[in-house]
Amino acid sequence: GENVEQHPSTLSVQEGDSAVIKCTYSDSASNYFPWYKQELGKGPQLIIDIRSNVGEKKDQRIAVTLNKTAKHFSLHITETQPEDSAVYFCAAPKSLGAQKLVFGQGTRLTINP
Amino acid sequence: GAVVSQHPSWVICKSGTSVKIECRSLDFQATTMFWYRQFPKQSLMLMATSNEGSKATYEQGVEKDKFLINHASLTLSTLTVTSAHPEDSSFYICSARGWGGTDNEQFFGPGTRLTVL
């Protein structure tokens, strides 16, 4: 089964700077990698995802990169704003073709004004 | 689109009572719904997977007789915590996956905070 490791556990950046969160996975057959943002007291919200047939995907200030050889994928947030402060989770399928997701441990991102 | 709701958003109950949490997909039909549990400052832990019209499958270590799941329609799944105890206090979150959705894509509800006194 899949194992997902996420780093760092906490990240503090100045407003306007970039933030990068990295996840590694164990199953080379995994083909779907979503990122979720969770604000305090709320459910996770899908912010971006990437499939194994592409190496990078971008949506405004958010981008995700995938390195299949090294089995890691990263979330990049540019021009950070205070509202980006939240906990971010990466995930990967529990096994090939599985509907279940395995989540990383989470990264608490704090944007300092 | 892809909105998932949960009710109630929070509940406080006495030890020994049962609590039912509803999860609804508002604008799509959910073939599969997932129930997660999240303790403070921790990640999401999958409890069970429910498919419409069939029995839920539970993750290892999750007591199926304690956490009853019913997925009676394509838009509604319920989780009942039976004989709740203080250690069941947690944040319960559901997610749903719909017809024609891309593989693995899940949409989460806002969560239900359960406090057992």
Image: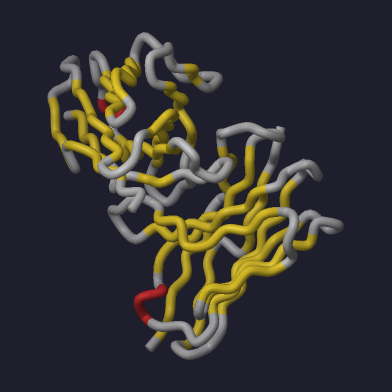
Horizontally, is A101 left or right of B64 in the view?
Answer: right
Q: Is residue B87 visible?
A: no
Q: Is residue B71 above or below residue A103?
A: above
**Residue shown at the point (44%, 88%) measured from the top left:** A15
Query: Where residue B101 appears, x then y in whole percent?
Result: 49, 43
* Residue B5 in the image, given as x and y percentages of width and height: 25, 43
**Residue B95 placement: quadrant:** top left
Quadrant where the N terminus of chain A sits is top right
Residue sitting nearer the eye, A31 or A91: A31
Q: Is residue B77 left or right of residue B8?
A: right
Residue closest to the eye, B46 or B77: B77
Q: Is residue A96 left or right of residue A44?
A: right
Q: How many marks?
A: 0
- Give the answer, above or below, for where B103 lies relative to B19: below
Is residue A74 in view from this perspective? yes
Identify the coloring.
Answer: secondary structure
Residue situated furthest right in the rendering: A69
> What residue occupies the far front of the structure in this picture?
B100
Q: Is residue A47 above or below residue B53?
A: below
**Foreground: B11 or A25?**
A25
Residue located at (23% from left, 30% from top): B22
Q: Residue A53 placed where, x, y %?
A: 75, 56
Q: Quadrant of the C terminus of chain A?
A: bottom left
Residue depicted at x 30% and y 26%: B77
Q: Residue at x 66, y 64 (%)?
A: A22
